[in-house]
């Protein structure tokens, strides 16, 4: 294992933080070009760009579902039985769509939305000897815009806000189907339209440089690419994947799965997110609600537990995280995926760190040592 190149990691984070990297096409493309050039400089010979098109914000999914459910309430507000049935069906569809979105899926009508260009940047580093295993590291290159739910006083309530959408839609469908008093149905429709509006308002605001989320993960993978390209593993191919539209429920990871999910079915997939500050864990449970959550692959959890036990001084353990991230589409495909994340010990939420000055070198060093331990474990297994 090489020592953590802290100075180099901090330099990468500073360079990535020179301009905001929100989920908008121009800024993300600038970051993608930077990463392509860096991989070339770091002697990674096989680099590819996977271009895809996607919506720009998660609120474009959740907001549309809220509007659909609210419209269902209005359709079913009449006395005619067919209107109540149609309204209830619309709301059930909205509830099921919201639940799928909260697990990282995309609603079927999204193809009719205006889409923007995005891309994944992928580097392949083959082993020096016979290929036996493959490990895929992912880090999303965009950063989130959370105008309201990023505030300390509101963060703990955000999961209930998002998770409540499918439940409220289901309640509305029952009230409509059984012809509940009109004032009750109106109240539910106001809640649904309000949730749609708030989800949109939450992503309207000033962009941040995203030093921890997720320049830290990107920087770790850049330094990793340099180290492995100089000294490849013996029998394990290392894939470095910088994903676009990560804040849209891991859309870039979903595109990566479409391209390589079957081909790399036996690979180990590790996502790095917010690993530049706070404590470190692997996410033992992901999601924003108890009825829309997902879990890492058991084999990968066993690997992460084993490596953590070999390095007890790192203090890394499994912990449930309130997160909708790159692991969602990977696990939906059944891949051996898990995420390493940083969190605040006091709150249990993602560690703060919008600017490079808030990055903690000690956390970067622990992340570095942990992922080298993971690679060594995979490469030396019989």
Image: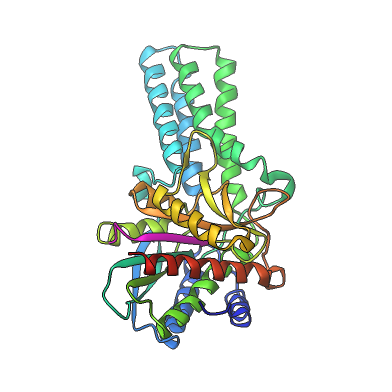
Q: Is residue 267 magenta?
A: yes
Q: How many marks?
A: 0
Q: What percent of the width, then of the height, locates residue 262? A: 25, 57
Quadrant of residue 253 in the image? bottom left
- Residue 182 in the figure: left or right of residue 376: right
Say which residue appears at 49% left-offset and 36% top-offset: 67
Q: What percent of the width, then of the height, locates residue 121? A: 40, 72
Q: What percent of the width, then of the height, locates residue 134? A: 33, 66
Of 243 and 202, nearer the camera is 243
Q: Is residue 65 magenta?
A: no
Q: Is residue 30 above or below residue 191?
A: below
Say which residue appears at 54% left-offset and 62% top-offset: 310
Image color mode: rainbow
Which residues make up the magenta segment?
264-272
**Quadrant containing the C terminus in the rendered view:** bottom left
Q: Is residue 342 above or below residue 106?
A: below
The answer to whether residue 306 shows anywhere in this view is: yes
The answer to whether residue 243 shows anywhere in this view is: no
């Amino acid at each position: 294992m090489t020592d953590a190149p802290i100075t180099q990691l901090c330099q990468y984070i500073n360079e990535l933080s020179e301009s905001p990297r929100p989920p908008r096409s121009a800024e993300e493309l600038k970051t993608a070009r930077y990463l392509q050039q860096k991989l070339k400089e770091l002697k990674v010979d096989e680099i590819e760009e996977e271009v895809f098109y996607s919506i720009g914000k998660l609120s474009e999914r959740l907001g549309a579902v809220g509007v659909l459910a609210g419209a269902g309430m209005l359709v079913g507000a009449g006395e005619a039985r067919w209107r109540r049935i149609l309204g209830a069906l619309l709301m059930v569809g909205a509830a099921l769509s919201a639940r799928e979105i909260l697990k990282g899926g995309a609603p079927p009508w999204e193809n009719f939305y205006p889409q923007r260009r995005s891309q994944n940047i992928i580097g392949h580093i083959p082993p020096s000897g016979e290929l036996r295993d493959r490990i895929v590291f992912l880090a999303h290159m965009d950063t989130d815009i959370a105008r309201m739910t990023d505030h300390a006083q509101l963060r703990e309530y955000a999961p209930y806000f998002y998770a409540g959408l499918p439940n409220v839609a289901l309640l509305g469908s029952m009230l409509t189907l059984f012809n509940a008093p009109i004032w009750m149905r109106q109240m539910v429709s106001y809640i649904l339209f309000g949730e749609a509006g708030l989800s949109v308002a939450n992503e309207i605001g000033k962009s941040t440089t995203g030093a921890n989320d997720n320049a830290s993960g990107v920087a770790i993978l850049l330094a990793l690419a340099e180290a492995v390209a100089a000294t490849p593993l013996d029998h394990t191919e290392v894939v470095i994947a910088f994903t676009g539209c990560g804040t849209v429920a891991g859309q870039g990871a979903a595109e990566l799965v479409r391209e390589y999910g079957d081909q790399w079915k036996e690979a180990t997939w590790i996502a790095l997110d917010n690993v530049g500050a706070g404590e470190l864990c692997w996410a033992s449970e992901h999601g924003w609600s108890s009825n829309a959550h997902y879990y890492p692959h058991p084999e990968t959890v066993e690997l992460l537990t084993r490596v953590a036990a070999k390095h007890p001084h790192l203090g890394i353990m499994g912990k449930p995280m309130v997160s909708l991230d790159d692991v969602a589409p990977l696990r939906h495909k059944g891949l051996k995926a898990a995420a390493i994340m940083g969190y605040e010990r006091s709150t249990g939420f993602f560690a703060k760190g919008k600017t490079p000055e808030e990055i903690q070198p000690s956390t970067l060093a622990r992340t570095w040592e942990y992922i080298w331990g993971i690679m060594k474990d995979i490469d030396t297994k019989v």
